[in-house]
Amino acid sequence: MLSGKRILLIIGGGIAAYKSLLLIRLLKSAGAMVTPVLTKAGAEFVTPLSVSALAGERVYSDLFDLTDEAEMGHIQLSRVADLIVVAPATADLMAKMAGGRADDLASTLLLATDTAVLVAPAMNVRMWQHPATQRNLAQLRVDGVQVVGPDAGEMACGEFGQGRLAEPEAIFAAIQAALVEGPLLGKHVLVTSGPTHEPIDPVRYIANRSSGAQGTAIAAALRDLGASVTFVTGPATVPAPSGVRVVRVETAREMLAAVEAALPADAAVMAAAVADWRVANAAGSKMKKDGTGKAPVLEFAENPDILATVSQGDMRPKLVVGFAAETDRVEEYATAKRLRKGCDWIVANDVSPATGIMGGTENAVTVISAAGAEVWPRMGKDAVARALAERIAVALQNS
Ligand code: C5P
């Protein structure tokens, strides 16, 4: 997803510098190349050896290293990258950037470059709030520098407040967003995924066998085409994709609330296996055997239909895609479902146990739209996701 992209990563000084090691791993596993630059202060917190071992490349650290100048001058170094990332960006580095100073390799690279720059600030809360830092931040934004974080929370210095380096996943997502090109650039797509858990009591719940694999693959494929994706997921067994906004929910009602909060969107793909029913008489404390041998009786109430609510609501996205997991008469039931729910397309699949689709890695789908039914060959869930994302891109372009 970032293959072929080169990131020049400037690691500033600060306790949060260790997180830049995790960021390098994320970038490398996404196929990016990382050229690391360690400031003098940065080298007090992470070693050049661990940085270069993870990046798989040499670390640049000293402006006046003559060997470097012979190999690759700092001007050239500043321009080979697709994106320059400063993480952590200290108050001092930000001040140098805002003031146009160039007294070490990192600041010289930043002044010499014409490449896009993303900074992830990290510092003590008072330093962050200081008018000087805020002035520098405003100047950097005016200069076109993108900023991710800082987060609020507990800090290594014992204080609490804004100033924590954004998590590596969030920096990674910002890098992706800064780099992606694609037909879905500027489009917001909402994806629901995974099962829902409907409580019986505080420790027991009713669930289904959905792994969330197909929804996750769809969110990743949409992201790869440049979409900004909100991923509303129940308790799935596969991890959520990186580079998307993840909203975790448990129940169908929570999922509906999260979906409504995420609108407006250009498209919505509802791949979640939402429980149709919840336990109406769920107990507030753990249900116990009372010794009489009498089993509890569960009563059920119907859950909201999220797909139908969104399809028929005021904030309806231009394109709404639903799923239909059927065990027989797939096309017939799914066609009826499309009309009943009011969505544009239904991606129908046969989840009878013999197919091995539910929880498996492959899918065989039939896409039902106003134009009729189209049977796709059996393929990996990733391939289904890519094909669907491309089709969504075409539909949004034509709408
Ligand atoms: O009605 P059925 O569950 O078969 O429909 C499946 C489609 O409806 C899926 O897209 C699923 O995400 C969505 N759905 C929903 N809310 C429900 C039940 C299903 O959004 N309560």
Image (cartoon, rainbow, N blue to C red):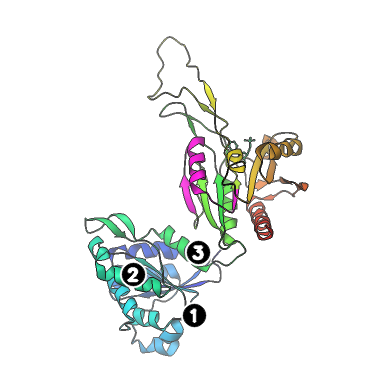
Q: Position of residue 114 (x, y in %)?
A: 46, 81
Q: Residues within 10 Å of mark 2 (few under 14, many from 20)?
A: many
Q: Position of residue 17 (x, y in %)?
A: 33, 65
Disc 1 residue type (three-letter): Val
Q: Label 1, on which residue?
A: 80
Which residue is at 49% across, 56% downward? 242
Left or right: 260 as drawn, with respect to 308: left
Up/down of 140 relative to 63, above or below = above
Q: Is residue 86 visible?
A: yes
Q: Position of residue 93 (x, y in %)?
A: 31, 74
Q: Label 3, on which residue?
A: 177
The local secondary structure at tag 3 comes to: helix
- The residue at the far top in this view is 292
Q: Quadrant of the N terminus?
A: bottom right
Q: Label 2, on which residue?
A: 137
Q: Position of residue 25 (x, y in %)?
A: 44, 63
C-alpha separation, residue under disc 3 versus residue under disc 1: 19 Å
Disc 3 residue type (three-letter): Ala
- Sequence order check: which comes first, mark 3 or mark 1? 1
**341 or 116, nearer to the observer:** 341
- Sequence order check: which comes first, mark 2 or mark 1? 1
**165 or 227, nearer to the observer:** 227
Q: Is residue 247 magenta?
A: yes
Disc 2 residue type (three-letter): Leu
Q: Quadrant of ligand 1?
A: top right
Magenta residue span = 245-268
Q: Is residue 93 magenta?
A: no
Which residue is at 21% across, 55% downward? 158
